[in-house]
Image (spheres, rainbow, N blue to C red):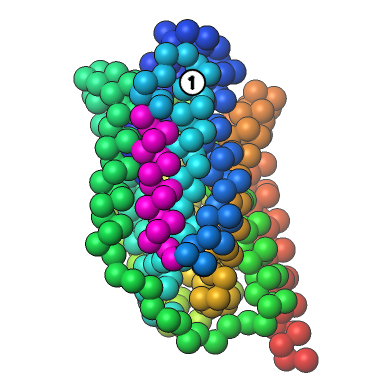
Amino acid sequence: MLGLFMILPVFMLLAADMPGFTPARAGLAVGIYGLTQAALQQPFGWLSDRFGRRRIMVAGLALFATGGVVSAMAETMGMLIAGRALQGCGAIAGVALAFAADHARAQNRSVVMAIIGMSIGASFLLSMMISVPLSTLLGLSGLFWLTAVLGVIGMLLVFTLPAAKVSKEKVLQESGASSIVWLFALSVFLLHAVMTLLFVVLPGMLVRQFGFELEHHWQIYVPSMVGSVILVFPLLRWVSAREKEAKAMPLAFLVLGIALGLMSLGGSLAAMVVCALAFFLAFNLLEAAMPSMVSKLTGASGRGQKMGLYTSFQFLGAFAGGLVGGWLLGFGGEVTTLSAGGALCAFWAVAMLMWFRSADNRQQA
């Protein structure tokens, strides 16, 4: 993830001198990674159910590394787009989550998923701080060579992982498992859509409204993320111990909606930090609890395929959030964009609560 995130902050500027560059082609080069990821998550998950998680993770990382080499050697935008698409073919996020779920006890699974989510968040924050210095030193080609090296290191690390365990978990019937997977697939789509939407709006908002220049934005993101991490682990343990996930998740979506709504009002920089803390806390809770619930309720049989479906919607949500967020920002401005995201989260909180209550009523009947 670090190799992927390092490219994003500097790509548009460094690719401008490449033959065939246009903003549309550069945008395609950025976005096509997410599209190929979304398309291949479920097939890779299906393959991991049949041939083993480790083999498929190694194959996916090999594709990612090969895509990095193609991108590093690219002399035209077309070749660069092809390299980025090949990088996206290493679609192993769902396989990795399934592997983690295979090796974690059900009662500890939310914490394990939280650790994975935190490591991704830490990679994102670190990339924000090191991408500019590294791009000055290595250039765009050098950054892609570095992503290839990181992919190879990841392959070597996979070989050190233990073999999968045989699971004896009790699971839902197939119809119940299918409906819960689709509920959480749609939920993670919305979750990552509003996260991407926030980062479409927030950087410009911090500069224009508060005079907070781009190189200092980490001073907002890092304290908010670290604060949310400190709070989310005890909260997850409390929720998991009491099996309150069904109540906590709609509440977390409501918190997301309130945070986005308050951000749209502006106010002080301190208020923005508090809203960001609340947003990241709710985001991290959902990011950990939802895949944990999917793995608990569906069991090990076909887990890779089901987690692949889940992560497909995760990547599609990020793509849609960027697309719709950019359109809303141009159409109605920052207030409209954040308000729309907040309203959608509040609506989904109600819809999710109604779904869980309906499921409880069906079980009691």
Give the residue drawn at x 29%, y 43%: 152
Q: Residue at the front extreme?
A: 51
Q: x, y (%) of residue 301?
A: 55, 76
Q: x, y (%) of residue 144?
A: 34, 28
Relative depth, front residue between 230 and 151: 151
Q: Is residue 223 left or right of residue 281?
A: left
Any part of residue 54 in sight: yes
Compared to 198, does 98 lie above or below?
below
Q: Is residue 165 left or right of residue 138?
A: right
Q: x, y (%) of residue 107?
A: 41, 80
Q: x, y (%) of residue 57?
A: 40, 55
Q: Which residue is denoted by mark 1 in the rendering?
A: 79
Quadrant of residue 5 in the image?
A: top left
Give the residue drawn at x 40%, y 59%: 55
Dot 1 amino acid type: Met
Magenta span: chief secondary structure? helix
How many neighbours does mark 1 have within 10 angstroms: few (below 14), some (14-19), or many (20 or more)?
A: some
Image quarter in which the C terminus is found: bottom right
Quadrant of residue 145 in the image?
A: top left
Any part of residue 124 in sight: no
Quadrant of residue 149 in the image?
A: top left
Give the residue drawn at x 52%, y 67%: 50
Image quarter in which the N terminus is found: top left
Relative depth, front residue between 167 and 52: 52
Q: Give the residues in magenta.
A: 52-69
